[in-house]
Amino acid sequence: MTLFTDPFDARHRLTSGCACGRHASQADHEADPAASSEAHARGAVEGAVMRALFPHDATRRAFLTAVGAGTAFAAINALFPLATATEVFAQGLKPEKTDLKVGFIPITCATPIIMAKPMGFYEKQGLNVEVVKTAGWAVIRDKAINKEYDAAHMLSPMPLAISVGAGSNPIPWTMPAVENINGQAITLAMKHKDKRDPKDWKGMKFAVPFDYSMHNYLLRYYLAEHGVDPDKDVQIRAVPPPEMVANLRADNIDGFLAPDPVNQRAVYDGVGFIHLLSKEIWDGHPCCAFSASKQFVTEMPGTYQALLKAIIEATAFAQKPENRKQIAEAIAPTNYLNQPQTVVEQVLTGTFADGLGKVVKDPDRIAFDPFPYESFAVWILTQMKRWGQIKGDVDYAKVAKEVFLATDATKLMAEAGLTPPASTTKSFSVMGKPFDASKPAEYVESFAIRRS
Amino acid sequence: MPASLTLRAGLLSVAIFAAFIGAWYLATLPTAGSAANVDPEYAALVSGAASEGQKSAFPTPMDVGGTLWEHLKNPFYVRGANDQGVGIQLAYSLGRVLVGYGLAALVAIPLGFLIGMSPLVYRALDPFIQILKPISPLAWMPLALYTIKDSGISAVFVIFICSLWPMLINTAFGVASVRKEWLNVAATLEVGPLRKAFMVILPAAAPTIMTGMRISIGIAWLVIVAAEMLVGGTGIGYFVWNEWNNLSIGNIITAILLIGLVGMALDLALARTARLVAYRE
């Protein structure tokens, strides 16, 4: 059941055909003027109370058919001041704290988090956010855990890793929104411009931003699909994105699967060329994420909601191609990405130099979609399992649900006037191989090259 | 009559500097490019060197001079939390160094004094000091971040822990090697222990203590740049990291120059102080 299913309706089907879940079909949804944010909020609060009283669909149905929806509503209203609760929710909770610090790594994945500052998205929600540039993923993790940051830009596998305790002590962490999809690339040093077949890459040294990153999993996946064992045939090391071009230039590494603008910067400086955009491995893969500790989410729901709303709106703004140039101008200065504006612009607009003398036009090079599909989390967990980062049995679905807060994103997307997806899972395929989120263990087993 | 040594040394310094700049200038002379057959649309998207199939070049002395002037002209600007003038960054770094170093001095000098007065404690603590002394500051950083849970205090802690040892060892050594005759004279005159410590041992050990302090300030200044590159946020180390991120060699050279100048100033200040407590036997 989605959040907007009306649990006072005994006849309501458990699967629904529209985005908000209150209508039989998408057409009904669009025709209904009551599908406004206020009506949504009321429905959501009443629904939450009803669902709390009757956690099982069958019991609730029985109760409703026995007494009727009106009686049920009145009975519950007597016990619980629904009107007050609805009002508080519709106004939006007041942020408990308005001066916030949000950490980011200077890469284009962080676009929504960064641009929300100069373009006033935080201000609109009544927040005074300081966005702080941070040196690397381990530092951003430690600063976020130490509560120096209220929320932080992380790689989407990191909240999962922190929650299951891989690479740090287990701390309940959440990922309320994805920032970008696609937007990464494999860049190789100029001297390898004739070695375009991964089978020739044995013995090379590659860099990825962090062990717990989509980059690591995508590069490993890509290599393994071409028969190259990522642990035995090549060396993969973690290098913070800002240091990658310097290392490529110094010949310390042969290539990297990195976030932008690192790839484009290597091209700009004549150090490397773009071998492959990550969208060609998995079109629509998540990359970076907006994350916060579970403690922050539960102790400061108002602040959390305002912050997430700002991020979701910024993400929606960034998704529109016509805004991309303006965003590049806002985030390129020293205070944020500290890159030449043309580099950022090439990444965001998708009209870019490939490093081999060609101008490539691919408007989907990077896209922004905040929705944290639970199936993404399950895929990431399967790869953690595949490469031995997590040992033992994993309850894939449970961890995914606890960390990727798809329900909150659904609610706030609707409030921001966006259309949230109908389901919290999404099917996709990686390099032509379909992924079924309901059979994660079998998926791990299906790979020839794996460490578990 | 030959010119004074100072004058000749000065002239030689100028000559070495000129030769260095000259060599740098020659090494960074632009090579003749073959930009003829490059697609102009492509060339617009990459840097000049890359459009000619080369890596971007090292900046010339003039470029770096220009960058340096830009920074010195306006050292205290604030364009947001992550972009502040080089003067402000240096002030942040100096602040951290002085706090860390000051705390280290407060701990090391009294402690070194006690250790130096007791041969037993000196011997007992020696292995610990010897093991802790050579640890790189950056090795402390993850531990500090993990336990202290605050990056600003962690940076100060790293300064503290690294500038502690030279001061501690030198103080202990200076106190332990006060001449026996002086102590005997003090004993003959029945001087009290406190008076002995302040009137005899402290002045006698002062030059050695100052040497330790001078070594420590040098180390502290070395460490701060590395520590700030790691934790980021503010400070001259962060400035270097941020410009490395942008591959802006001109800015990095500027920062290196300023780091050197500030380090020299700190060392000179302590050398002056050391002269005040020096004595001739």
Image: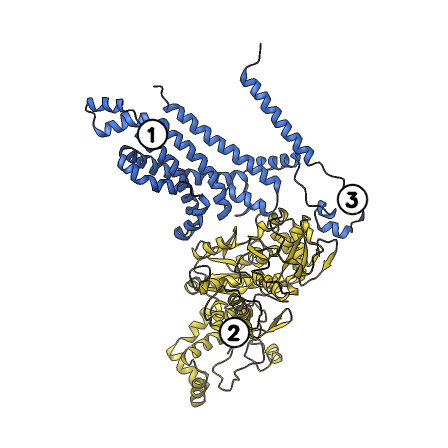
x 45%, y 76%: residue: A48
The amino acid on which the numbered mark 3 sits, given as a three-letter code, is Ser
The amino acid on which the numbered mark 2 sits, given as a three-letter code, is Ala
x 19%, y 24%: residue: B190
Q: Tell me the colour chain B is drawn in.
A: blue
In the rendered image, which residue does mark 2 sit on?
A441
Badge 1 marks a residue whose secondary structure is: helix
> Toward which corner of the image does residue A77 lie, by quadrant?
bottom left
> Toward which corner of the image does residue B278 lie, by quadrant?
top left
Q: A384 or A2: which is nearer to us?
A: A384
Q: Is residue A322 above or below residue B175?
A: below
x 46%, y 45%: residue: B138
The amino acid on which the numbered mark 1 sits, given as a three-letter code, is Gly
Q: B186 or A50: which is nearer to us?
A: B186
Determine whether label 3 and label 1 are within 8 Å by CB.
no
Q: Which mark is residue B174?
A: 1
x 74%, y 49%: residue: B43
Q: Which mark is residue A125?
A: none
Q: Residue farthest to the right?
A: B36
In the rendered image, which residue does mark 3 sit on?
B34
Residue A308 as seen in the image, left or right of residue A366: left
| Upstream in sequence: badge 3 or badge 1 | 3
Alpha carbon distance from label 2 to label 1: 68 Å
Which chain is home to disc 1?
B
Badge 2 marks a residue whose secondary structure is: helix
Instruction: Pinpoint residue A40: horizontal percent, then vertical percent.
Output: 52, 74
Which chain is home to disc 2?
A
Q: In the rendered image, is residue B92 in sight?
A: no
Which quadrant, please, contains the C terminus of chain B?
top left
Q: 10 Å neighbourhood of mark 1: few (<14), some, or many (≥20)?
A: many
Instruction: Pinpoint residue A243: horizontal percent, then vertical percent.
Output: 58, 49
